[in-house]
């Protein structure tokens, strides 16, 4: 009918169950919130290669963690029928594991029959019931029988703690039955041992969230059910979050907040503890305490009087791929294409962490760290570190924020790529302006400096991918020219007339400027070395500007005095040419050693 007339989840779930039943496969419909699913028997291979009988969810939406059992039939062994938890589908996995070991199940059943025959002999009954549990440690009926007998003879606190610990270990892959049984012990003992037993229960739930597929074929169901139980009001010894309404607080679980429970916590993995014995149900951590929390140590919680140490599981945030760069020339931190990542934190020279400020400048010798802040139960990420150094440029560098791209010949990806020329970012990624195929050999871009300025130097970074279309090939015919135009008072973005530009300087393929080329030419004409040509250039009034001659004379004097390329020489060189080009030229002549 479902195929002929149609149907929603209920019809599909029943179809699954009926089709499976027709071929002898156990299968039954279960409810999920607003949905119907099907639990179906199957054989699943475990880590050793053995085929293990279990159940899977067909037509699934919510998983085992929010799957009910059938209300009428299919309560295998009648286990779980008395549970007060709404989503009891996990009992199918529990009972199936017991039934899969038919011999152990039979021996446990026979031992329980023996126990029942000793009516009036409590000691003999308990001995036989213990034998039933020994025959099959996970057997629900044997566990309930032991609880009945222990309650009747008035077992003491130490006995209950030992019993609950053993129970938690035996049912480590079945968190729901473990949870229900320890809750039942608390009810039967009138909560006299609540602190100790609940610590064991919640420690077992947390461990159940960490099981692996190598340990059990039901790993996904185990984790799902444990997480669902931990989300209940009685599912945690203590709660914590870095932010939100209770940000920075460790709080006892709701079911422990009304009884004056004494407890303690540790932030360093248990090396030191802080006790709260005056009825406190929460504690506000300081900033330093919050910074000290790590994913390795977690937050340890122990209810005083319990032997179990519980943990609040702390993870560590990933920094992720952030396209961010510290620009020491501009004393600023930039993001690729100006795409600022929101919600970051920063600190300067090991100071206090604060919200990241994209507009802040860092003048002087400073170290700046940037990270993703702590949130929820995740500690802050590792930080990326940038170093800034003091220098004269701190006062003279033209801020990128005061510049704008006025116009350009072409741009492969439009204005966003052209703006990379002045975005301040030169970190990882495709951070360069790349042109389209030009109709002429010349590619150009016009930068608006904001207002008229006197510019002493300009730095050009050449991309590494020289074989990429749109990136200049630095061959003999390659020449970059710098031109300047006065401030025309045009509206922002209106292109400047090309006739307004005057050539200021040119950069050749060799990596230097026209000054280097002219010295080369002079050396060739005079039949002398490059350095000797520098000496001749000091007196060449027709070929070199007065500024270049003065700088060349200073350069010759320094070299003649036998100095290496120290800071003074570097300043001289920078006043004439691109430093790399001149150093390469001089090194080739063997005149000085490049540094």
Image (cartoon, grey):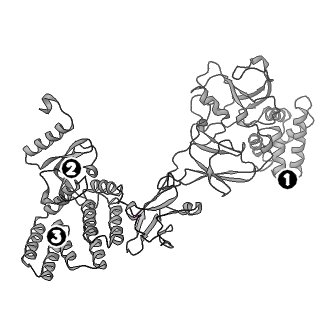
Q: Which of label 3 and label 2 is nearer to you?
A: 3
Q: Earlier in the sequence, mark 1 or mark 2?
A: 2
Q: Is residue 292 above or below residue 115?
A: above
Task: Report the span colored magenta.
Answer: 233-237
**Residue hosting label 1:** 563
Tell which tag, 1 or 2, sits nearer the viewer: 2
Task: Choose mark 3 or mark 1, whichever is in front.
Answer: 3
Question: In percent of the image, x 72 and y 43: which residue is there?
Answer: 329
Of pointers 3 and 1, the one earlier in the residue sequence: 3
Measure how far apart labels 3 and 2 are at the Cα level.
27 Å
Check the picture and name the quadrant holding the N terminus. top left
Give the side of residue 425 with respect to residue 124, left or right: right
Q: Residues within 10 Å of mark 2 (few under 14, many from 20)?
A: some
Q: Position of residue 474 (x, y in %)?
A: 66, 33
Task: Give coordinates of residue 212: x percent, y percent.
Answer: 31, 59
What's the mark number on residue 142?
Answer: 3
Element class at badge 1: loop
Residue under pointer 2? 56
Dominant SS type (magenta) = loop
Q: Which of 304/22 is in front?
A: 304
Q: Residue at x 11, y 72 (%)?
A: 112
């Amino acid at each position: 009918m479902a195929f002929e007339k149609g149907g929603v989840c209920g019809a599909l779930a029943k179809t699954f169950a009926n089709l499976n039943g027709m071929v002898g496969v156990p299968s039954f419909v279960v409810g999920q919130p607003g949905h119907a699913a099907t639990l179906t028997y199957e054989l699943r291979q475990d880590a050793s290669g053995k085929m293990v009988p279990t159940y899977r969810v067909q037509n699934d939406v919510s998983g085992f963690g929010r799957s009910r059992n059938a209300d009428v039939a299919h309560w295998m062994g009648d286990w779980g029928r008395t549970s007060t938890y709404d989503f009891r589908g996990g009992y199918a996995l529990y009972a199936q594991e017991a039934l899969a070991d038919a011999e152990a199940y039979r021996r446990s059943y026979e031992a329980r029959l023996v126990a029942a025959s000793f009516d009036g002999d409590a000691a003999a009954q308990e001995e036989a019931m213990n034998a039933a549990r020994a025959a099959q440690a996970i057997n629900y009926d044997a566990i309930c029988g032991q609880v009945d007998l222990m309650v009747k003879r008035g077992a003491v606190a130490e006995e209950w703690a030992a019993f609950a610990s053993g129970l938690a270990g035996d049912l480590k892959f079945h968190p729901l039955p473990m949870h229900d049984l320890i809750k039942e012990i608390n009810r039967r003992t009138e909560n006299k041992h609540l602190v100790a037993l609940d610590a064991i229960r919640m420690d077992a739930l947390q461990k159940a969230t960490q099981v692996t597929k190598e340990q059990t074929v039901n790993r996904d169901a185990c984790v799902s059910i444990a997480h669902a139980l931990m989300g209940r009001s009685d599912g945690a010894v203590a709660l914590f979050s870095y932010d939100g309404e209770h940000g920075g607080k460790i709080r006892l679980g709701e079911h422990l907040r009304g009884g004056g429970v004494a407890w303690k916590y540790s932030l360093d993995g248990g090396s030191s503890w802080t006790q709260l014995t005056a009825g406190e149900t929460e504690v506000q951590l300081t900033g330093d305490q919050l910074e000290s929390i790590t994913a390795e140590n977690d937050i340890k919680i122990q209810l005083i009087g319990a032997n179990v140490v519980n943990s609040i599981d702390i993870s560590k945030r990933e920094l992720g791929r952030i396209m961010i760069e510290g620009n020491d020339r501009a004393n600023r931190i930039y993001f690729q294409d100006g795409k600022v990542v929101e919600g970051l934190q920063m600190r300067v020279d090991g100071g206090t962490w604060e919200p990241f400020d994209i507009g802040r400048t860092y003048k002087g010798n400073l170290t700046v760290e940037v990270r993703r802040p702590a949130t929820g139960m995740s500690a802050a990420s590792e930080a990326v570190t940038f170093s800034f150094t003091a220098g004269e440029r701190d006062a003279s560098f033209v801020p990128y924020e005061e510049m704008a791209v006025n116009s350009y010949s072409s741009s492969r990806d439009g204005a966003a790529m052209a703006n990379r020329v002045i975005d301040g970012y030169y970190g990882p990624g495709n951070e360069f302006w790349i042109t389209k195929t030009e109709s002429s050999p010349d590619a150009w871009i016009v930068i608006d400096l904001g207002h008229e300025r006197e510019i002493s130097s300009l730095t050009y970074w050449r991309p590494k991918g020289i074989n990429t279309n749109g990136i200049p090939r630095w061959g003999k015919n390659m020449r970059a020219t710098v031109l300047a135009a006065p401030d025309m008072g045009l509206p922002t973005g209106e292109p400047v007339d090309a006739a307004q530009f005057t050539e200021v300087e040119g950069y050749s393929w060799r990596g230097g400027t026209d000054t280097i080329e002219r010295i080369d030419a002079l050396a060739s004409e005079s039949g002398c070395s490059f350095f000797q040509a520098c000496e001749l250039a000091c007196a060449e009034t027709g070929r070199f500007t007065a500024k270049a001659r003065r700088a060349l004379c200073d350069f010759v004097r320094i070299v003649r005095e036998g100095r290496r390329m120290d800071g003074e020489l570097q300043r001289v060189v920078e006043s004439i040419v691109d430093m790399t080009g001149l150093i390469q030229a001089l090194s080739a002549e063997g005149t000085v050693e490049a540094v």
